[in-house]
Amino acid sequence: MQYPEHLEKIITTFRKLPGVGGRTAERFAFDLLTWEEAQLAAFAKLIDETPQKIESCSNCGALCERQSCNFCQNTKRHQQILCIVSSPKEIFSIEKTGHYRGLYHVIDDLLSPLDNRAPSAVTIQKLKQRIKSLGVKEILIAFNASLEGDATAHFLKEELLDFNLPIYRLAFGLPMGSSIEFADPGTLGRALTHKALF
Ligand SMILES: [Zn+2]
């Protein structure tokens, strides 16, 4: 049985979302059919306004509603500690921990030896400029524990050598609540390599 064409289009669109398979997309689409017209219009408007309402901060690349983001505008944050992430989304994950009070900087063109890709000269220049103008004293690289994350972290370390700053990476280790017995060899290997003094 075929769905009406418009419904099919809605289902196809929902399927583009991460983690949404065919059945979930169908459930979402059928649910929309029960919404009142005003609710649908409000939803459509919300989606439609996204490019105008959400921008990237011109300083750090975080998501914001105006030119400058809440992090850059907040003078209570440590201005001389800079955390480098690979996506604006990761900033929110770090914020949720409540353990970081410095500033952020997004570098989204990670070095990928396999795809022959690297952070552009403009990206690096912008980062260096920001480190200078803020008078950064400490850098924390918070990339994923992946081939790209590792390669980019090493690349940045070389690029920022002249600043003579302490550069940290997030510690790698066992997730909370996990057991050594079931940890994969990669994770356990990293935990052993980056052991912490107790
Ligand atoms: Zn910002």
Image: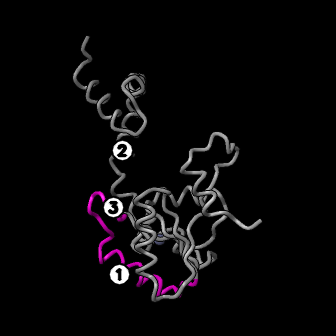
Q: Is residue 101 left or right of residue 22?
A: right
Marks 3 and 2 in Cβ contact (< 8 Å): no
Q: What stretch is highlighted in magenta?
A: 109-137
Mark 3 or 2: in front is 3
Q: Is residue 70 left or right of residue 32?
A: right
Specify few, some or many for label 1: CA neighbours under 10 Å numbering under 14, 14-19, or 20 or more: few
Q: How far apart are marks 1 and 3 (CA)?
A: 19 Å
- Image point (63%, 70%), residue name: 101
- Image point (36%, 25%), residue name: 22
Q: Earlier in the sequence, mark 3 or mark 2?
A: 2
Q: Which of 175 and 9 is in front in this view?
A: 175
Mark 1 or 3: in front is 3
- Image point (26%, 10%), residue name: 1
Q: From this viewpoint, which residue is outermost toward the top?
A: 1
Q: Which of marks 1 and 2 is nearer the N terminus?
A: 2
Q: Indicate which disc residue 139 carries.
A: none
Q: Earlier in the sequence, mark 1 or mark 3?
A: 3
Q: Indicate which disc residue 112 carries.
A: 3
Specify few, some or many for label 3: CA neighbours under 10 Å numbering under 14, 14-19, or 20 or more: some
Label 3: which secondary element: loop
Q: Mark 1 = which residue?
A: 125
Q: Is residue 15 among the parts visible in the rendering?
A: yes
In the image, what residue type sits under mark 3? Ser
Q: Under 8 Å from ligand 1: the CB of mark 1?
A: no
Q: Indicate which disc residue 45 carries.
A: 2
In the image, what residue type sits under mark 1? Gln
Task: Note whether 153 is above or below 7 in the view shown.
Answer: below
Q: Distance between the residues labelled 3 and 2?
A: 37 Å
Task: Note whether 89 is above or below 198 in the view shown.
Answer: above
